[in-house]
Amino acid sequence: MAFELPKLPYASDALEPHIDARTMEIHHGKHHNGYTTKLNAAIEGTSMESDSIEDILSNMDMSNGALRNNGGGYFNHCLFWEVMGPNSGGLPSGSLAQAIDTAFGSFEAFQTAFSNAAATQFGSGWAWLCVQKGGNVEVCSSANQDNPLMPGIGCGGTPILGLDVWEHAYYLNYQNRRPDYISAFFNVINWEKVSELYDQNR
Ligand code: MN
């Protein structure tokens, strides 16, 4: 079974003014589509054709560049579209809110830690909020299309929130102002979805 590019769960202009429609169209239709096509090419004719993307990532041969870049790119963007939405932002609630308070002391301290991880990731990469078995959450970042499900990335657990800090994610609207893009991201986080992922993976 080949992997398919998922449809965006909202219109491409739904996240404006925080993320513009043109960026969403290129990011989803060109970049994510490219990762999907190249992932399928990388697994064609192997036993991975019947594996889930999570299994492919957690059993990754990190020396396989095509699989690492495109498998990561496929998964990371699937998560990214899901954890954003229109009429979003605000604060998490329930068990996730408690876990964030336990780990960071407050939502504001979490926001600072996550924003710093995104701002200080040199070059292309992602910032993550991950949950470990038992329910603890942590923030980290990784380079390129790596993610915490892959072996040896150093940020354990399951990613439940990811922020793409590749320039293709923000350059049309924000140019070099990555910090402005990071702060705008907090207006489009779909905390209901992040909470659902927390509860499924804790
Ligand atoms: Mn991207």
Image (spheres, rainbow, N blue to C red):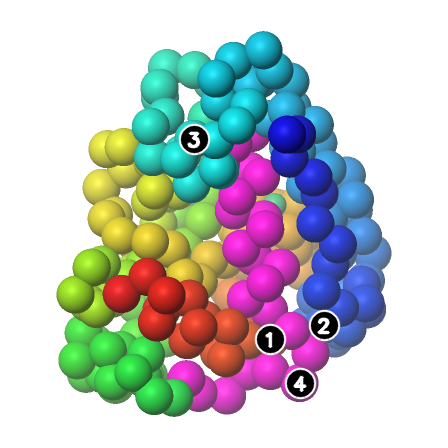
Query: Marks 1 and 3: which is nearer the front?
Result: 3
Classify mark 3: helix, strand or loop.
helix
Picture quarter with the N terminus: top right
Q: Position of residue 119 (x, y in %)?
A: 42, 57
Residue designated by label 4: 87
Front label number (3 vs 2): 3
Which-is-in-front pick, marks 3 and 4? 3
In percent of width and height, residue 66 lies at 53, 19
Residue type at mark 3: give it: Ile
Kind of residue at disc 4: Asn
**How packed is label 3: few (under 14 Cα within 10 Å), some, or many (20 or more)?**
many
Tell me which corner region of the image, top left, top right, bottom left or bottom right, holds residue 94: bottom left
The quarter of the image holding the C terminus is bottom left
- Mark sitting earlier along the chain (3/4): 3
- The magenta segment is 70-92
Q: Secondary structure at mark 4?
A: loop
Does 167 lie within the magenta span? no
